[in-house]
Image (spheres, rainbow, N blue to C red):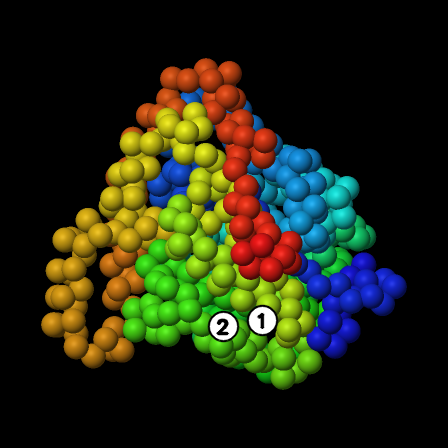
Amino acid sequence: MLRVEGPAVKDEQGRHVQLKGLGLGGWMNMESFISGYPGNESGWRAALRVALGEERYRFFFDRFLEYFFEDADAAFIASLGLNCLRLPINYRHFERDTEPFVIREEGFRHLDRVVDLCARHGLYTVIDLHAVQGYQNQDWHSDNPGFIASLWTQRQFQDRAAGLWEAIARRYRGNRWVAGYNLINEPNAPDAETYLGVHRRLYETVRDVDPDHLVFIDADAYGSNLDRFDEVWPDTVYSIHDYAYCAFNFGGEYPGETRGVWCDEAWAERHFLKKSRFARENNAPVWVGEFGAVFSGAPVRDANRCRIIHDQIGIYDRHGAGWSLWTYKDIGKMGLVYLPPDSPYMQRLRSGLERKERMGVDSWTSTGVEVAEATDPLLELISREFPDRTSLGFDPVWMVERVVRSIMLSQALVPEFVDAFAGLSESQLDALLQCFRLQNCVVREPLARVLAGQPIGA
């Protein structure tokens, strides 16, 4: 079993283990920009259930989960010299809202399968609760259909989260290839007391049934603020998320300027050091649970993105931090491997995806230039009526993007995407979903070389 010794993670023989790998985004916690649908996962699933009927609905998602990660995927990741895969999960696989505290055995089938596949190829896994009961943050990636994070204020959601972690810890207790448990992905708590109280509850729940595995705790404020802590917890790895400003869809040259900010390796290192300060000053291990870049298909821009990732990995290595790139597989936005544009799946969704891009619905990976005619007047109104924005208690730019683009417009697009699958037989659905198999995907070779530790441009 892995354990913490000072700032290092070590194995049973006392050897240092730098956990470095990828996140399996979009798998047991689906995200719109990763697999193409609009909105949040549970909304997408509910609409498909109505369109396909229960039997074909179950078939659809079972095949999706199977093809998204198979033995070939684990072998490929191991071939790059990586040793870890972070497994984001949605609580809905294991517990229904209509049956709280009833753990569903069937939810573990694919999770067990991938943990075992990774073990077979010498890959550790980190089980990451990416979507928590009641929602731990205000965004789509916690499967939040709105923008209220009720986990922090509702005891019932905290109790259910503790119950799920007890079941997970009990199941994987003694499994040496499970590196540990990432309690809450990207929490955004209202204050330090609440953040620490909920995490302490989950930490102690896990420790009661599994005292041996590592516990990974994400910094507050979406993985950026570890200063909530005033002491180090035993066998705990402190996780930050470290997306570079210049690696977003609006990023400019690198090294170079993005929206008035000069971005280079020194800039990236300052950000890492600031976010990881608590762990480093207290001799505790740091893990960058997420970082990555948005790719566009433009050679120069994508080369810049690879250089950013290369420089970040160099920073993490110099400071002894583990890391996990977001994300392994998708439809072409951030993935190490991705579906080719001419694949049957992409062709079936082509018109809908083009419309999503025009409207900027996936605010994480698209610019939303055309929807600016609707959002700009709102922002101008807020600036005029509330010149002191600090009095609002929220970021108006974020709120407008979240409500208009990621909620209202994305939900309006759901019927169009559902129609792309309605009426298809199981064999037709199976053929589309096989597009997610590694053998049918494209490897982003420059990024693969960076992850494998080869010199940039090799």
Q: Name the residue: 30% across, 34% down.
A: 352
Mark 1: amino acid = Ile
- Percent across and percent down for residue 15 are 82, 66
Q: Nearer the viewer, residue 166 or 75?
A: 75
Q: CA distance from mark 1 to mark 2?
A: 8 Å
Q: Nearer the viewer, residue 401 or 43?
A: 401
Per the rendering, the mark at residue 125 is: none
List the single residue furthest toward the right: 13
- Percent across and percent down for residue 251 are 36, 61
Question: Image height check: is 50 above or below 319?
Answer: above
Q: Which residue is mark 1?
A: 315
Q: Name the residue: 25% across, 44% down.
A: 358
Mark 2: amino acid = Glu
Residue 278 lies left or right of residue 293; in this view the side is: right
* Residue 279 visible to the viewer: yes
Q: Name the residue: 29% across, 38% down.
A: 354
Q: Which residue is mark 2?
A: 265
- Percent across and percent down for residue 388 are 20, 79
Residue 195 lies left or right of residue 233; in this view the side is: left
Question: Image height check: is 69 above or below 56?
Answer: below
Q: Are marks 1 and 2 in contact (CB under 8 Å)?
A: yes
* Residue 129 visible to the viewer: no
